[in-house]
Image (cartoon, grey):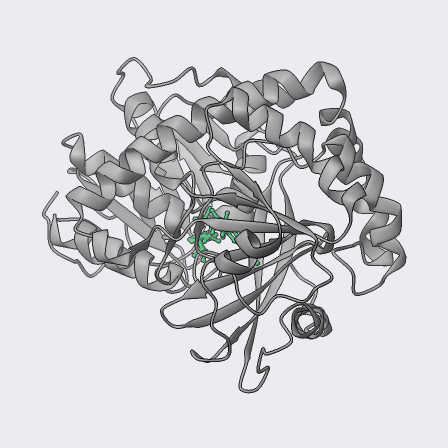
Amino acid sequence: MSGQAIEIGLETVFPDDPIDVLIIGAGIVALAAAQKLQAAGRQVALLERGGVAAATSSGNAGALAFSDILPLATSGKIARVPRWLMDPLGPLSIPPGYALRIAPWLLRFWRAGWADRIASSIAAQVAMMGLAEAEMDRMIAESGLGDLIHPDGSLELYESEAEFQDSLPGWTQRTKAGIAFEHVRGAAMADLQPGLSPQFIAGTFVPGWRNVSDPFIFATRLAADVEGRGGIFLQGEASQVFPQESGARVVLTDGRILAAKQVVVAAGAWSRRLTDLLGDYLPLETERGYNTTLPLGSFDLRRQLIFGAHGFVISRLTTGLRVGGAVELGGLDRPPNFKRSAAMLKKAMGFLPGLSAEGGVQWMGFRPSMPDSLPVIGPSRASPHIVYAFGHGHLGLTQSAGTGRLVADLLNGQPPAIDPAPFRPSRFR
Ligand SMILES: Cc1cc2nc3c(=O)[nH]c(=O)nc-3n(C[C@H](O)[C@H](O)[C@H](O)COP(=O)(O)OP(=O)(O)OC[C@H]3O[C@@H](n4cnc5c(N)ncnc54)[C@H](O)[C@@H]3O)c2cc1C
């Protein structure tokens, strides 16, 4: 396989010289997998139907949130669900037409929050986060991305003593995982972020939290590095993956066929369209998220602020201030409801009274989410040559490099860097 971009015609490409590893998708997970495979000596091609990192990986909050080790379905969050659902523009919404369709996923989500599941889920997430951080640092160094990383820490904010007390069990879990943090009040809190509304009575500072300067810039710089090392970017949409005796073939929607020795499905929230056809029925749904990016100078933001009770954050990017989050369990086809972006911005104006809300750009992205808050990383039941890497939910940027490392280990037949069992696709059978 040559290292330069190629024109693909209407027949099997590389019929006698299959692609070494073909990755479906070019979001942050696919790009990190490509980088890690290249570092392990493999040649890669990425098949993307849109632009590089143009989907969910372009507009997220840019956090490397290695301290986010708790599953979403913790008792604290589940308790808030009824109140959240009452507000049609609140932190969690389910369009009425989608409620029945997503009911089985919600049932699994609720089950994942039971005490017997929480401990193993946290253990898996702690292992993944340890790997993710180490592999992210390695990728940043190898791909020359250090100038895009901002070690500002994060500040989570609470409006009442009860809310602060409710957060404490989660912080105890982080202590056990060796994550440093500091609860702050009064002047210490104001020093970390001047200009906060007095409604916030306490906060928790996580000094090890880092943000990327802008997730789209981070991903496109990584893509340029992958391309510089001989990676090939192909334009096209995969419609089906067929296992072969050695390797696999990928049929595109325009009829072209790509032959590869190994295939990685890293198509984010759209991966299920391919995995169902391979006989892996995985409960992948999308948690649609919204935000508004305000121009630089809209507020003197010192670090990422987290408003857990309201389900959104404000991130400090070099390209602006990003206000957003929320979860809309509404599937892949419904048009966006940007009233959600506006609702979070309105709240943010109350939380930061000096915030100028002019000139914002609204965005919606499709988080690829599994009900147990763990990604899917591992081989398809159809073939060991087809490996899945998707379902990272709120943490795809954070866990991209760790996922890439596991994918490379699995495809190269190396002992995996961490136990991949909690992430195996077959866990839902
Ligand atoms: C509001 C919001 C804030 C977030 N904040 C953070 C954060 O701060 N930190 C963090 O770690 N995560 C965050 N996330 C989550 C993170 O953005 C996602 O987990 C991550 O982007 C998923 O990456 P991905 O590569 O799996 O998917 P995507 O970025 O969606 O990439 C999938 C790609 O596959 C392509 N594709 C799909 N189907 C096909 C096909 N059949 N053929 C060819 N190409 C195909 C798509 O075009 C797309 O480019 C946030 C998400 C949202 C919505």
x, y (%) of residue 111? Answer: 77, 25
Q: Quadrant of the N terminus?
A: top left
In this rendering, is residue 150 above or below 321? above
Viewer can see residue 391: no
Q: Is residue 233 left or right of residue 426?
A: left
Q: Which of 343 and 233 is in front in this view?
A: 343
Q: Residue 412 sits in which quadrant?
A: top left
- Kindly identify the residue that appears in the image at 57 percent across and 28 percent down: 280
Q: Is residue 3 left or right of residue 63?
A: left
Q: Nearer the viewer, residue 418 or 301?
A: 301
x, y (%) of residue 131? Answer: 36, 27
Name, please, the residue furthest toward the bottom.
Answer: 358
- Kindly identify the residue that appears in the image at 60 percent across and 22 percent down: 121
Q: Quadrant of the C terminus?
A: top right
Viewer can see residue 76: yes
- Kindly identify the residue that appears in the image at 38 percent across and 21 percent down: 384
x, y (%) of residue 123? Answer: 54, 19
x, y (%) of residue 79? Answer: 84, 38
In this rendering, is residue 289 above or below 108? below
